[in-house]
Image (cartoon, rainbow, N blue to C red):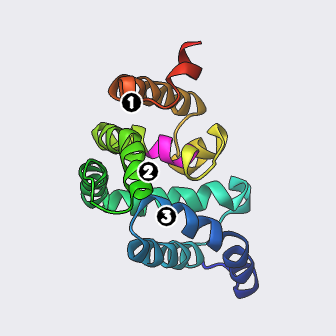
Amino acid sequence: MAVPPDRGADLFDLHFAEIHRYLARRLPEDVADDLAAEVFVIALGGGHDPSLGEPRPWLYGIVTNLAARHRRSEVRRWRAIGRAAGRQDAGHEEDVLDRVDAARFTRPLASALAALKQRDRDVVLLVALGGLSHAEVAAALDIPYGTVASRLNRARRQLRKALGAANPFKEDLDG
């Protein structure tokens, strides 16, 4: 059942920018553009059952499924960011110092994210980049609330371990 045109326009107007922003933080800009549009093609074609609650988690569920199709390229991207963050280009002294400082955290974080299982990475990215609550993540991924908490907890442990001394929040976590 398709969404009526007036409701479809409302759905698009209310959520497109947020969905696109999430995708753009997770995927290359051109992929984010394409996938954000595809989210709404799917959403408007399939309709949203109001009995399922708010459309936001439903839209993020579509986003997550589409992003999963790009899983291999996403992992390659995180690995490339990790490799690129380790490079230091010659240039202005401050730029070099900024890059060194950023690389200290970006490279290990990108590598650690790439090493996570896709289902754990999806939860982390929906919370960290999408700003979704645990309940919204559960709805988006169609998993129990407790599963969100356990996946997020497991991912945090793995990220802390992988980041080790490079963890910019180590002091906050330890004390």
**Residue 127's x, y, as percent?**
57, 44
In magenta stretch: residue 126:
yes
Q: Residue at x 42, y 58 (%)?
A: 95
Identified by mark 3, the residue type is Leu
Where the N terminus falls, by quadrant?
Answer: bottom right
**Residue 116's x, y, as percent?**
33, 37
Give the camera-side residue of 56 and 48. 56
In this rendering, the answer to whether 166 lies above or below 4 is: above
Instruction: Give the spatial CA distance, label 1 vs label 3.
Output: 26 Å
Q: Residue at x 29, y 41 (%)?
A: 111
Which mark is in front, 1 or 3?
1
Of the numbered discs 3 and 2, the one sitting upstream in the chain is 3
Circle 1 sits on which residue?
A: 166
**Residue 15's x, y, as percent?**
67, 69
How crowded pointer 2 is (Cα within 10 Å; few <14, some 14-19, many 20+) is rated as few
Can you tell which quarter of the image residue 34 is in? Answer: bottom left
Instruction: Give the spatial CA distance, label 1 vs label 2.
Output: 15 Å
Circle 3 sits on which residue?
A: 23
Of the numbered discs 1 and 3, the one sitting upstream in the chain is 3
Identified by mark 2, the residue type is Asp
User: Secondary structure beneath disc 1?
Assistant: helix
How crowded pointer 1 is (Cα within 10 Å; few <14, some 14-19, many 20+) is rated as some
Q: Which residues are magenta?
A: 122-127
Magenta stretch secondary structure, dominant: helix
Identified by mark 1, the residue type is Ala
Q: Is residue 158 left or right of residue 54?
A: left
